[in-house]
Image (cartoon, helix red, strand yellow):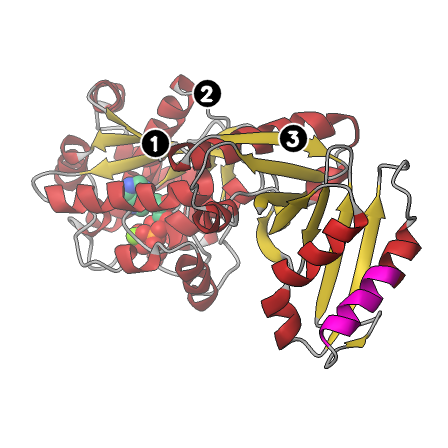
């Protein structure tokens, strides 16, 4: 029996004239995610995308699992492809959905007929197929309001498709349809979640990581690369920029009042991130900050860091509890990597008593003694780019 995968668009359906642009983006993203599984054909019709395997022995279950992580899909299912002959449809329905129907107590049939030349109309398909299913599975009863299984028959241009229960998709909007943003990716729990949340809203995500060797190790950097690799399941390909941050941190340590280390360091991160963002066509920054979580995450501190950014700084987890963030980290499968115990540049030279309410004037005075432009230029020039394609 031939099988295909049907994808139901979610919010894309709301996009009016841009709809086909969004659909094409979604198809491209889905296609890329499946490339190494084999050849697939993609066709779109009526809020549905048909994903057809074009080779023998393609692992469709793996394909479904990957597609469940592609933003822009509200629901998906495997479906049997049948010739447009009612006898064939009946037989296929009871064999293809046998396991689901055996487990269920109630069912209904839902028929969609876009090929108006098909001899049975939708209500007739429902009635006749419903009767045939009842004959074959006498333990079932029909429940049109809240059935355990809905047997869906779609009679389309080229064939008929039969499927049962749909699986939930990842929702959201296709990655890349809203532009590109640069995520400040630490090794922690919050920033990968922040990146995935913005990808869900249609942004392509690039990432920037600040590393301070030898204070931070090669393994800490590898951890960030692993995190970015994990994120590709939801975000698609990611360019990861690794910025050498040691020189800047040493200067801050030597030249600035200790209680301002953290805020000044974060302002350097913002400035450098903005430059790298412009160079790589990113139009916003994304961080994993959440109000009140640590000393540098007060609104006064955020005000001081935003002051040096010349593009929007998106903080999708800003109002979330750690517990809520952790839940999403589990869902996107970054949690286990995030909790590996490697050092981050933020934990190097941490002051004992960081200012929780930094005053901009004093921060600016402290920074004035440094060769800011030279430090930033060297860091940007020596930034390494790692392309993470999966
Ligand atoms: P996370 O769990 O994302 O590390 P956190 O709760 O540990 O966050 P901080 O360490 O204060 O909080 O960092 C706040 C945000 O700053 C991070 O979410 C991340 O966006 C950014 N950030 C921190 N350290 C780095 C780094 N070394 N490289 C890039 N971005 C960083
Ligand atoms: Mg952190």
Residue beneath label 3, please? 43
Residue 179: x %, y % from top left: 55, 27
Magenta-tinted stretch: 128-137
| Closer to viewer: mark 1 or mark 2 | 1
For disc 2, the marked residue is 281
Is residue 38 in the magenta section? no
Element under disc 1: loop
Quarter of the rendering containing residue 329? bottom left
Residue 233 relative to residue 388: left or right: right
- In the displayed structure, 137 sits above or below 344; it is below
- Per the image, label 3 sits on a secondary structure element best described as strand
In the rendered image, residue 304, in percent from the top left (x then y), is placed at: 42, 41
Point out the residue furthest to the left here.
214
Tell me, yes or no, if residue 250 can be seen here: yes
Tell me the CA gap for discs 1 and 2.
Answer: 18 Å
Image point (66%, 70%), residue name: 101
- Residue at 58% x, 37% y: name it: 51
Mark with earlier residue (1, 2): 2
The reply to whether the residue tagged 1 has its Cβ within 8 angstroms of ligand 1 is: no
Judged by depth in the image, the label closer to the viewer, 3 or 1, is 3
**Number of numbered tags placed on the structure image:** 3
Q: Is residue 329 above or below residue 104?
A: above
Residue sitting at x 14%, y 35%: 246
Q: Which of marks 3 and 2 is nearer the N terminus?
A: 3
Circle 2 residues within 10 Å: few <14, some 14–19, many ≥20: few
- Circle 1 residue: 389
């Amino acid at each position: 029996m031939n099988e295909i995968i049907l994808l139901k668009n979610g919010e894309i359906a709301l996009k009016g004239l841009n709809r086909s642009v969004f659909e094409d983006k979604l198809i491209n993203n889905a296609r890329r995610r499946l490339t190494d599984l084999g050849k697939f054909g993609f066709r779109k019709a009526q809020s549905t995308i048909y994903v057809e395997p074009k080779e023998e022995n393609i692992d469709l279950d793996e394909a479904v699992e990957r597609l469940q992580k592609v933003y822009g899909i509200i629901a998906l299912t495997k479906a049997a492809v049948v010739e447009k002959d009612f006898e064939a449809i009946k037989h296929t329905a009871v064999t293809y959905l046998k396991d689901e129907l055996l487990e269920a107590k109630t069912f209904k049939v839902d028929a969609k007929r876009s090929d108006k030349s098909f001899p049975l109309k939708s209500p007739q398909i429902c009635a006749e197929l419903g009767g045939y299913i009842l004959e074959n599975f006498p333990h079932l009863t029909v429940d049109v309001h809240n059935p355990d299984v809905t047997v869906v028959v779609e009679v389309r241009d080229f064939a008929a498709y039969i499927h049962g229960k749909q699986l939930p998709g990842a929702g959201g909007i296709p990655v890349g349809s809203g532009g590109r943003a640069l995520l400040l990716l630490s090794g922690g729990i919050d920033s990968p979640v922040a990146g995935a949340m913005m990808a869900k809203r249609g942004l392509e995500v690039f990432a920037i990581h600040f590393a301070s060797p030898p204070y931070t190790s090669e393994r800490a950097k590898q951890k960030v690369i692993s995190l970015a690799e994990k994120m590709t399941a939801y975000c698609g390909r990611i360019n990861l920029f690794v910025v050498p941050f040691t020189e800047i941190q040493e200067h801050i340590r030597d030249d600035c009042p200790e209680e301002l280390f953290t805020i000044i360091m974060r302002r350097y991160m913002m400035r450098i991130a903005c430059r790298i963002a412009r160079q790589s066509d990113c139009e916003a920054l994304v961080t994993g900050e959440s109000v009140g979580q640590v000393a540098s995450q007060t609104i006064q501190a955020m005000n001081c860091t935003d002051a040096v950014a010349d593009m929007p700084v998106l903080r999708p987890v800003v109002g979330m509890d750690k517990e809520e963030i952790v839940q999403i980290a589990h869902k996107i499968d970054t949690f286990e990597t995030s909790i590996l115990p490697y050092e981050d540049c933020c934990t190097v030279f941490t002051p004992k008593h960081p200012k929780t309410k930094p005053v901009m004037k004093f921060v600016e005075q402290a920074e004035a003694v440094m060769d800011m432009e030279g430090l930033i230029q060297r860091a940007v020039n020596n930034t390494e780019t790692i392309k993470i394609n999966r």
